[in-house]
Structure formats: structure tokens, C-alpha cells
Image (cartoon, rainbow, N blue to C red):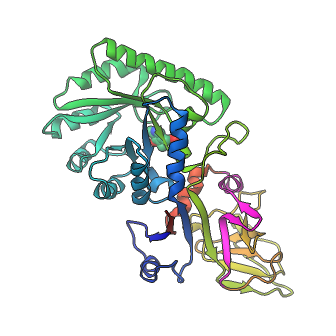
């Protein structure tokens, strides 16, 4: 069953057209296919990797890693995750409307004066410094749950680990503060990173022991994200906060981690040829504004144009690499990426015609372009690649 949805914030004319005709917009035929059943499958796989009773906090930041925040949140909730971690207030408000009872944890973003908005919508603030804790205490009118973030050495948000014990005990004494969780985030992608993360996780668990020895109750503790689970980081925490693996992808190199039992949530990103440009002697492509701004060589072959450019989050390939799309199951090289359009070399598919499907990501007959391919061509992380491209796409959900 197919269900079409549109990006929640800015509803373009194309998306309105797509909705009213019940199909992908013909005025800008770019779309992403999301496999909601894959999310449920991945939650089950991850659950089987965890100790019984460990809570799963599913991350839906960045529009649910590009997959559509409300639909994905609903499916995670149906799959029984224990809480959702939100990136922005706007997204959280949309999720709240769809899931009135779900625990929604706000990852760090707000200034202290944003706290009343969180409280009004029943969102759980992540507190990464004392000022936020004081704001919750000041604005709350009854005991209010907070999740305290500790910086375990990544140097971003959080109370630095060496100062955390005293700071957290101080926060616990503030009026109307109920510390529900203490957590940290230790991202890594390789084996040296794993060693670092294990060491810092152990130090974090020592902090929890110290807090409990000082009489503080900490109901929820969490240190592992996707790679922590995949690489077997051990801790005594009773929660994990997961993004990538729930969406069926990895930031770890394939030779270090096996993801074959997970299913990608993003099944494909597709567009259509809006123009076929014939071969003729003296033809050039992007003569002054080729890929990366360099003049390109004369190109006499057949080329095609897709309505998918930099403004759609497409990046082609970094210098020295070639990016491809699939047309009729054939790999066709990208010759130029401009702000709204890209030019494709059709020499390998001379029978390609106006309106034919073009696969940016996904399978076509025996060929496939994976997120790993796009990530390699662009020299960017898989989540970044996907999130950048998802902003202007019509979303098509497979239940
Ligand atoms: C995004 C995020 C996660 C999840 O990370 P993955 O590597 O995608 O599993 C966990 N914790 C925090 C604080 C995050 O921002």
C-alpha cells in the first residue's frame, strides 16, 4: 500500500499537486520511497542484540534522518520503542500532535528562554548546562523530568565528565527538577575510536555509581548509540539512543560491521528525465560551469537533464570521482550538477527518453546505487548524504 505525504513545513505547489493527484508531482518529479516496515524490522533486530529490558530511545532528529518525522515516529512508536529523541522544536510539536502520550526527549538546541515552550508541549528537556537546569526550575510549576547530558570527551554539548558529579548533585537540589536520566554520546567509526569510547563509557558508568553512592536516584542511564551497540561497547546502562541502525545503515566501514540483517528505511530516491539533448559535433556540456566550477571538455554524446540539483541536496562527486545514476538499469555518469538541474551522460542508454525513470539511490534491474556509493562519491557521511537530499523530495511511504 502506498501513502503519499509531503514535507511538513513548507508545502510547495509540486507537493500540493502530488497530494491532490495521489501520485508524484509531474511538475518536479523527484521522490523518495520510505519502507516503514523496515523500521519495525530493524527495531526487532536491535532488540535481539540488547540485554532484555534495555530501553530503546529512537532518534528522529533531522526529519527522522531524512525519512519523514511524523510517519517514522508513529512507526517507531508502534514498534514499541520507549522514547523518541527530537532535533527541533517544530518537529517535536508535529510528533506530539500525532503521539500525545509518547515520551519526547529534546536533544540540545534551545536557549534557556526556550524552556517554557518545551514545557507547554510536554517535551522532556535535555539539560546540557547549569543554565538550562535553572531555567527548567524557574519555569516549571510542578516536578519536571529532565535528562542530563554529560560530555564524555567529544567536546560538544554536555557537562564535562570531570565536573559532572558535583554539577548533577547541585541540579538535583533545584526546585521542580526530577532527574529522570543521565546520558552521554560517544560517536566513533573505527577501531581506535571504539577503544576510546569503551574507556569513556567506563568512566561514565563510574560517574553513575558515584551519583548513586551519593544518594541520587538515576532511573535511566544511557551511553551507547548505534556504533556502541554494533561494536559491542559494554556498559551497565539501561537505555540506548539509536539512529543509524534503526534506519538500516551504518557509519562504520563494511569490513568492520555487518549490517546485512538490517533493512534500509530509504528504499530509493528517484527522478525523471525532463529533457534529452541530442549528440552533435561541437556540443559542450557546462562549458564554463562544469562540475566543481571547472570548464569541462567538449562532450558530443547524448545527454539528459534531471530536475535534481544542488538545491535538492545533490552533490554529484568530489574531484577524482564520478557519480552515477541508473537509467533502464544502466549506470549513467553525471556530467554536471547545477543548482536546480543535473546533466547525465546518456551514451550508454541511447534509447532513453523524456519522462523515463532515473534512480539516484536504489535498485534498477541488476544494478544498484547504494547510500554507501553516494557517500563514497561525495566524500560525506551516509546520514548527511540522505538528510541533505530529503528536504525537497515528495515522500512515498510503503507500509
Ligand atoms: C544522533 C544521536 C544519537 C544516535 O546516533 P546514531 O549513531 O545515529 O545511532 C545518539 N545520541 C545523540 C545525542 C545524538 O545526537
In the picture as drawn, the residue positioned furthest to the left comes out as 141
Above-or-below relation of 214 to 19: above
Asked whether the viewer can see residue 76, the reply is yes
Q: Residue at x 82, y 73 (%)?
A: 297
The total number of labels drawn is 0
In the picture as drawn, the residue positioned furthest to the right comes out as 281
Res. 82 image quadrant: top left
Task: Tell whether position 368 is magenta.
Answer: yes
Magenta stretch? Answer: 355-379
Residue 294 percent coordinates (x, y): 74, 67
Residue 146 percent coordinates (x, y): 28, 35
Res. 10 image quadrant: bottom left
Above-or-below relation of 191 to 337: above
Residue 333 percent coordinates (x, y): 77, 68
Q: Nearer the viewer, residue 270 or 160?
A: 270
Res. 340 image quadrant: bottom right
Asked whether the viewer can see residue 150, the reply is no
Above-or-below relation of 269 to 135: below
Q: Residue at x 54, y 83 (%)?
A: 26
Q: Nearer the viewer, residue 257 or 279?
A: 257
Q: Nearer the viewer, residue 193 or 353?
A: 353
Task: Tell whether position 384 is magenta.
Answer: no
Residue 283 percent coordinates (x, y): 81, 84
Above-or-below relation of 84 to 160: below
Q: Residue at x 50, y 58 (%)?
A: 36
Amino acid at each position: 500500500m502506498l501513502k503519499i505525504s509531503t514535507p511538513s513545513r513548507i508545502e510547495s505547489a509540486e507537493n500540493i499537486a502530488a497530494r491532490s493527484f495521489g501520485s508524484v508531482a509531474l511538475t518536479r518529479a523527484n521522490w523518495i520511497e520510505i519502507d516503514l516496515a523496515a523500521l519495525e524490522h530493524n527495531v526487532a533486530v536491535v532488540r535481539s542484540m540488547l540485554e532484555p529490558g534495555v530501553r530503546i530511545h529512537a532518534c528522529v532528529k533531522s526529519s527522522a534522518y531524512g525519512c519523514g518525522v511524523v510517519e517514522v515516529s508513529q512507526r517507531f512508536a508502534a514498534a514499541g520503542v520507549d522514547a523518541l529523541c527530537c532535533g527541533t522544536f517544530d518537529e517535536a510539536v508535529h510528533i506530539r500532535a500525532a503521539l500525545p502520550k509518547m515520551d519526547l526527549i529534546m536533544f540540545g538546541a534551545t536557549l534557556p528562554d526556550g524552556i517554557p515552550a518545551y514545557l507547554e508541549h510536554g517535551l522532556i528537556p535535555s539539560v546540557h548546562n547549569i543554565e538550562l537546569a535553572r531555567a527548567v526550575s524557574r519555569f516549571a510549576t510542578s516536578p519536571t523530568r529532565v535528562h542530563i547530558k554529560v560530555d564524555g570527551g567529544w567536546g560538544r554539548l554536555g557537562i564535562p565528565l570531570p565536573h559532572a558529579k558535583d554539577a548533577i548533585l547541585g541540579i538535583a537540589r533545584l526546585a521542580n527538577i526530577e532527574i529522570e536520566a543521565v546520558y552521554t554520546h560517544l560517536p566513533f567509526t573505527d577501531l581506535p575510536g571504539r577503544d576510546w569510547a569503551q574507556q569513556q563509557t567506563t568512566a561514565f558508568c563510574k560517574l553513575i555509581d558515584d551519583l548513586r553512592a551519593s544518594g541520587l536516584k538515576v532511573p535511566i542511564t544511557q551511553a551507547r548509540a548505534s556504533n556502541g551497540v554494533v561494536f559491542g561497547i559494554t556498559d551497565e546502562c539501561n537505555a540506548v539512543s539509536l539512529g543509524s541502525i534503526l534506519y538500516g545503515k551504518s557509519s562504520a566501514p563494511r569490513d568492520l560491521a555487518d549490517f546485512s540483517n538490517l533493512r534500509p528505511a530509504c528504499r530509493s530516491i528517484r527522478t525523471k528525465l525532463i529533457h534529452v539533448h541530442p549528440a552533435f559535433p561541437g556540443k559542450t556540456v557546462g562549458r564554463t560551469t562544469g562540475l566543481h566550477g571547472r570548464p569541462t571538455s567538449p562532450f558530443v554524446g547524448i545527454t539528459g537533464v534531471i530536475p535534481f540539483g544542488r538545491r535538492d541536496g545533490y552533490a554529484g562527486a568530489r574531484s577524482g570521482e564520478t557519480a552515477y545514476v541508473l537509467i533502464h538499469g544502466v549506470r549513467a555518469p553525471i556530467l554536471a550538477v547545477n543548482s536546480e538541474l543535473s546533466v547525465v551522460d546518456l551514451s550508454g542508454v541511447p534509447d532513453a527518453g523524456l519522462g523515463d525513470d532515473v534512480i539516484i539511490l536504489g535498485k534498477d534491474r541488476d544494478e544498484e546505487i547504494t547510500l554507501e556509493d553516494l557517500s563514497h562519491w561525495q566524500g560525506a557521511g551516509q546520514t548527511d548524504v540522505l538528510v541533505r537530499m530529503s528536504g525537497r523530495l515528495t515522500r512515498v511511504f510503503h507500509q
